[in-house]
Amino acid sequence: MRRKLHDNSLSLMALGVFLVLVFLQSITGWRVSNADDAEHHRSTQSYGRYLRSGHFAEATFENWESEFLQMGAYVGLTALLIQRGSPESKKPDGDPSDADPREAADDPNAPWPVRRGGLALKLYEHSLSSALLLLFLLSFVGHLLGGHAEYNQQQIAHGEAPVSLWSFLTSAQLWFQSFQNWQSEFLAVFTLAVLGIFLRERGSPQSKPVAASHAETGNG
């Protein structure tokens, strides 16, 4: 058990921090929502009801959407483009990630799609970016539905008519929320790719070795 915890400490830590933070988000979001209701002389809601509300869904999926977009775009762009000197880039003159997987078809330790070949291998070759794209689309739908519910709740609270899902989909409100998050994710990608050329973090696989030259591309 101790070895398993050691070998999976990164994912376990990330999952644990995520669960703590999403719980804290839900508690603080619940208090903010109830404070807004009280200010406008509306009845407050229980914590369980808040978790099913558009306010919570919109805030949660809006952020998930941008994160999965960033990771999916990053995986796809680094497969196609080069940034010389960055540890986040493939090597300009050939990289192990470009190796033909069919050469490992007879390796018993290779993943089964590699050993099977054909369509299974074609799908597996792009399974990571495809999974991240799917998670992005699902999060966008969650953002859309949650945002629509929250927007209509605000419309009703202010004595105005609710709008259709299509009207909300084509509204500036939804896309303003999305674009303000999406632009920051690509800024983060740019920053990490460029800072990694000149700066180091000893012990991190996301950094080049401390003694590596600025021109060295890849992380080793």
Image (cartoon, rainbow, N blue to C red):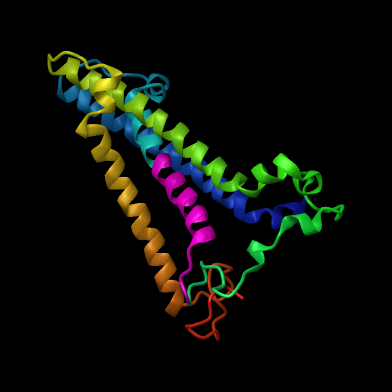
The residue positioned farthest toward the front in the image shown? 118
The span picked out in magenta is 64-84
For this rendering, which residue is in front, 112 or 22? 112
| Above-or-below relation of 7 to 148 | below
The image position of residue 130, as x and y in percent, is: 55, 42
**Quadrant, the C terminus:** bottom right
The image position of residue 51, as x and y in percent, is: 41, 25
Q: Residue at x 49, y 83 (%)?
A: 215
Q: Residue at x 55, y 84 (%)?
A: 212
The image position of residue 80, as x and y in percent, is: 51, 60
For this rendering, which residue is in front, 180 or 155? 180
Q: Is residue 56 visible?
A: no
Q: Is residue 145 magenta?
A: no
Q: Main secondary structure of the magenta part?
A: helix
Apparent side of residue 87 relative to residue 195 in the rendered image (left or right): right
Apparent side of residue 28 relative to residue 113 in the rendered image (left or right): left
Q: Quadrant for residue 21, please give it.
A: top left
For this rendering, which residue is in front, 214 or 123? 123
Q: Is residue 220 visible?
A: yes
| Above-or-below relation of 12 to 220 | above
| Above-or-below relation of 49 to 193 | above
